[in-house]
Image: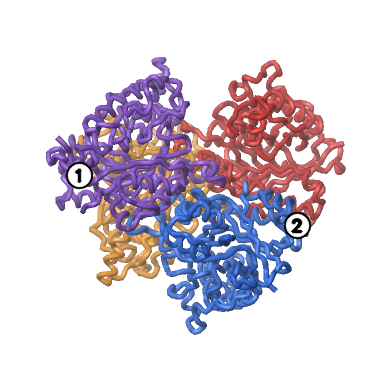
Chain colours: A blue, B purple, C orange, D red
Amino acid sequence: MGMKIGVYKVAMDSPGDTSKLENLIRNGEIDPEKIIACIGKTEGNGGANDFTRKLATLSYQLMLSRYIGKEQSETIVFVWSGGTEGVLSPHATFFTRNDDEMDELDNNVPGLAVSIQTTADIPAEHIGRMPMVIEVAQAAKKAMTDAGVSHPEQVHYVQVKGPLLTPTHLREAAVSGKELVTKDPNLSKGFARGAMALGVALALGEIQETDLSEEIINKDMSLYSSVASTSAGGEMTNCEVILMANTNKGSGPYSIGHSVLKDAIDTSGICQAIRNAGLDAINIPTVEQQNQIVAVFAKAEASQEIRGWRTTMLSDADIHYERHARAAVGAVISSITGNSGIFVSGGTEHQCPPGHAPIACIVKKNVD
Amino acid sequence: MGMKIGVYKVAMDSPGDTSKLENLIRNGEIDPEKIIACIGKTEGNGGANDFTRKLATLSYQLMLSRYIGKEQSETIVFVWSGGTEGVLSPHATFFTRNDDEMDELDNNVPGLAVSIQTTADIPAEHIGRMPMVIEVAQAAKKAMTDAGVSHPEQVHYVQVKGPLLTPTHLREAAVSGKELVTKDPNLSKGFARGAMALGVALALGEIQETDLSEEIINKDMSLYSSVASTSAGGEMTNCEVILMANTNKGSGPYSIGHSVLKDAIDTSGICQAIRNAGLDAINIPTVEQQNQIVAVFAKAEASQEIRGWRTTMLSDADIHYERHARAAVGAVISSITGNSGIFVSGGTEHQCPPGHAPIACIVKKNVD
Amino acid sequence: MGMKIGVYKVAMDSPGDTSKLENLIRNGEIDPEKIIACIGKTEGNGGANDFTRKLATLSYQLMLSRYIGKEQSETIVFVWSGGTEGVLSPHATFFTRNDDEMDELDNNVPGLAVSIQTTADIPAEHIGRMPMVIEVAQAAKKAMTDAGVSHPEQVHYVQVKGPLLTPTHLREAAVSGKELVTKDPNLSKGFARGAMALGVALALGEIQETDLSEEIINKDMSLYSSVASTSAGGEMTNCEVILMANTNKGSGPYSIGHSVLKDAIDTSGICQAIRNAGLDAINIPTVEQQNQIVAVFAKAEASQEIRGWRTTMLSDADIHYERHARAAVGAVISSITGNSGIFVSGGTEHQCPPGHAPIACIVKKNVD
Amino acid sequence: MGMKIGVYKVAMDSPGDTSKLENLIRNGEIDPEKIIACIGKTEGNGGANDFTRKLATLSYQLMLSRYIGKEQSETIVFVWSGGTEGVLSPHATFFTRNDDEMDELDNNVPGLAVSIQTTADIPAEHIGRMPMVIEVAQAAKKAMTDAGVSHPEQVHYVQVKGPLLTPTHLREAAVSGKELVTKDPNLSKGFARGAMALGVALALGEIQETDLSEEIINKDMSLYSSVASTSAGGEMTNCEVILMANTNKGSGPYSIGHSVLKDAIDTSGICQAIRNAGLDAINIPTVEQQNQIVAVFAKAEASQEIRGWRTTMLSDADIHYERHARAAVGAVISSITGNSGIFVSGGTEHQCPPGHAPIACIVKKNVD
């Protein structure tokens, strides 16, 4: 009744390049039937007109449908962040889950367990509001059970992807008179991210339902989850939860850890996430340790200044501030891990203390 | 007959902001008569249409001319690099030199010495060619003598700024029939940087005159200086050399070191430059050590890949590859030094082995 | 008691290039003592980090101070718009005014008259509010009198430049408890532009004081001036008004007209402004007529669609929508006038009906 | 033995939006079996990292394969240009051809005829060289015959799309020792465009085979076709020719014309193309005439200056010069035609005299 999780990071020569994954399938290194999720970076601009994410999902679905059929290929959850600024490398990390192979964990060393859960469709009037919080909390609780979580602190990363308000929603609400959280689609993105993060916090007991109300969403930033990473997109109608934890159900060679970045150049936060995942790394890891780091998921936020020195991210009219932030945070993490295939995205509402950013890290455990 | 060098890094709220330096002057912390050079970053795009460098020079000259007169203010050498991508912070590092204050160095601990030298005007037909190499070599040799250099390895940083071919040069050459190194102003920039770097290498004995000929400039990249940092600008008619070395003439509290970055995320190269400057830093420096790091000068180059993983710097039509490179290298250095007032510029012809980038670092020596 | 207005459009090779104007001064074509204003375009990005405007003002002031002294050079009003997208050409249009030369206008043909007026400093708590409206209205009224305006319809262009809320204002207000129109510096820009435009409308009788209240500023867009063009900048402390009208006091060869652009490709609006200025142009002007068009001042606004077809200006994360809008409107106007030295800027609050944009045009009258 | 050509311009809400075409199919307005080609604009950046073109082709192929099968959907020729700067609107113009419906043209009024032809695969060593010229010439000749062209002047637009040199080509050539036209993939794009345009010129008798040799390709720019429009892409292995002409075989309501733009603001060139297509338009067309303009295909080139006034397209490090050029030319054409669904792309080698740009226009003929 356990699960063996596989983690496969593949490079992408373009957002439509699926050849590296297909090679793994053809070589028998990965069983396409077992793929449950993909988290990756594409080389778009990360903005509203970044269509590389859609091209990547479409391309992988088309390729995979030749092996596992159209229907099953569409059950795989794809999470893309656009924007590979600086040294960041376009890539996709695929997760497989094999429930059959599971051996009983006799040595009591917990391993990485992953659970995918989805909510019902979120109607427009619930987006960015308490019902969305509750829906996500329920899905996250299901995921915890499925992953074998016995204590919330076993959970290190909960990626949630859900809907935002689209122009269509706004037009329909104008007709029907339904009240929405905001009339600005861009603002709705932040509300959705915030509500989903609070849902995770609620599921994990980081906050209590009594702490919550419509009014505190994206207002009271002292409420947050330390392990949520949420994103909102116009193509979504419901929420998809990818929960990662170290549990006794997880029988593979991987474990996960997390920490927080206090600013964009916080090397100690990165090192702490690596140690939290199980590597005995003091300061910058050795090359051997770097090779054990399989995946890093982080958020990057622009800031007016870093340790008292002004940055120009937010006043630059040529390059969007998110691109500045990803370039910096991505390079710093890459310099510690020795690998630039790093997942860095933006928007940290209720996912950490204000000004900070969450980071999670999967490592291959030492084999002795 | 020694010199006391002062190093003052000031923030800039905009390319026209000279208030932080003026405050130091008013407070008596810096004697404007002693200022010899300024090396800094401005928040432009770093490209052909970056006019922030000119605004910064003009603004500082105007402010300083109120204290030291127009004529003397125009003798100060200003070296600006445009582009504060990612966490990089707009700033200016001013250097003062006081030849009067010099005490005899009785403890035989060499200190930072700085010498400024200029060449005669370089005619268009010499730009990027052997006569430019020779002119720079002669100026660098004069600077070595002036700085009290007894062994070339005392020299850690030679910043040279000189002319490139402008459209005016090309028009005049078309009329006069003079042959130029190239007809492309943009290409001439690289030739000028390369020739000036070879001039430094020649002065320091890193290469011999017999190694040199017109043909090898920007061709034979096995010839280089390890301490040159060169830049070319359309506003220059001659070359300006700023040479920094640790010598017995240098009586202040600073020393300088250098190293090479093997790629954009080479933390060990950064740490080595810091150690080379005299800090006993293993791995990432402590906060106390970070506070002793006064200035860092580095170059950043775009690359197709980093340790086997593709980057998108060179195929991005939205953000120039130099901006990607500076964002990454600047963030990595800042994460090690704990300060984002870092000088990072581009173009490494004959300034290091191909694919690498030079880095120099000034530290305040331990006071016991 | 009349005035002869001179209009001189000069190209600029860079934001610091003042050579074309200096040539006119040296050739005796323009008397620097008579220069009262400059309206021009610089090749920056037009955003918060566009420092080309400051460089241009500083450079012209420095050059002119050699001819007319520092003090007088600083009385000249400079209005710059950054951003020369598409075919737009960096240039400056200088206005001279000679009150001595004035002949009595015996032929009853009104000519271009220009008056510069300034307000007192606008305290932060008045920016974007009724007191700013009133101040601008008073200055505009003074300018009307000075320019010899007998009927408001003689006025065709009122350029007003004034302060916005800066971070410093916000900090001080937080301490003093003064209430400001907004806490967002970017939003304050629009409030300031709107308040100044309402001031012009009030002076001209386009709206009545009874129409006005704090609440309608940037809310009730049915109130507007048809001839105002306003801009706000962080460097301003008071408002500067440049009023242009055809009056009997105007004795030179120029006249001015205006119209409105209904969308970014409204050729008929452009042609109408040209005809309104006095050229008998049906459809696209002839080359002879194009040569009589001396200056064009227009605003450009981004829009989601043009005549039912979607644009991507507002969803493009790489190029700011103002740059898209200026590129389009600038090219269309240039194609009608045959000259790309066109002044196009952004922000039309209370300067025309919503979705429209104002345009004014100065022509050299037919000499028979 | 004639053909009825249908022309259907559909808007696109995103590069993956195929709903407008699908609506036409469902409504029975367009027979998907008859679609032969699509020429359109997508909202990418138009550069090497513009993946919107691929997404658009993939999305239309997927949608159409549900109606006409995968195989036939892949026979449709898709020509996309990325970049909808300024007012340009993302759209696709689909062409249908019905050979059955053909009536004999009894009134001797020629109508629009379209022929699609393809060449054999072009090996790397032939790309940008004489064999490519010859291959395209042969395909264009076949297209002329197929379209019923009796005189070359009946041909108004020949869109050719073919291969360029990819990094893979270069690697293979390094191994095999095959000599290529250039080692720079970006330069090969221009050589390919030039060679294909010369092929069209040869087929149409605009130049003679004796004029041609390897050496003149992209060198002797006095040789050109007035009706070619060529583009090169890394995804192509052979060349696809879309030839449009007014012939007696063309029985539909459309006719085509062409002209040349002498610069980016050449309204007379645009009007001439419209008249050449059959509309009796003096100067700017009336709204009725604008409604008869069905499609416009133009090229845009950046230039250092327009009629003596400097532009900043080529020195702007933030926005690529092709984007500046498309924004300007697209807006000017849209202002004449009253519609911003205009096809504007770049690269005019051998497609017009140097500095000029070709333009073609399809109109719906007057029905009386």
Q: Residue at x 77, y 34 (%)?
A: D118
| Residue on which disc 1 sits | B252
Percent coordinates x, y for residue A16 in the rendering: 66, 49
Where in the figure is residue B80, as x and y percent of width and height? 33, 41
Of residues A332 and B64, the one nearer the viewer is A332
Give the answer, above or below, for where B135 lies relative to A190. Answer: above
Residue D145 position within the rendered picture, expressed as x and y whole percent measured from the top left: 81, 30
Mark 1 residue type:
Gly
Residue extending furthest bottom?
A: A210
- Which labelled disc corresponds to residue B84? none
Query: Which quadrant is home to the N terminus of chain B?
Result: top left
Q: Position of residue A151 (x, y in %)?
A: 55, 78
Mark 1, residues whose alpha carbon is within 10 Å: few (<14), some, or many (≥20)?
Answer: many
Residue A216 appears left or right of A41: left
Residue type (three-letter) at the residue carrying disc 2: Ser
Q: Is residue A368 left or right of residue D57?
A: left
Report if residue C12 is visible in the image. no
Provide the chain ID for the residue under circle 2: A
Location of mark 2 (residue): A65
Among the 4 quarters of the image, the one containing residue A332:
bottom left
User: The residue tagged with tag 2: helix, strand or loop?
Assistant: helix
Decide if residue B3 is on the left or right side of residue D326.
left
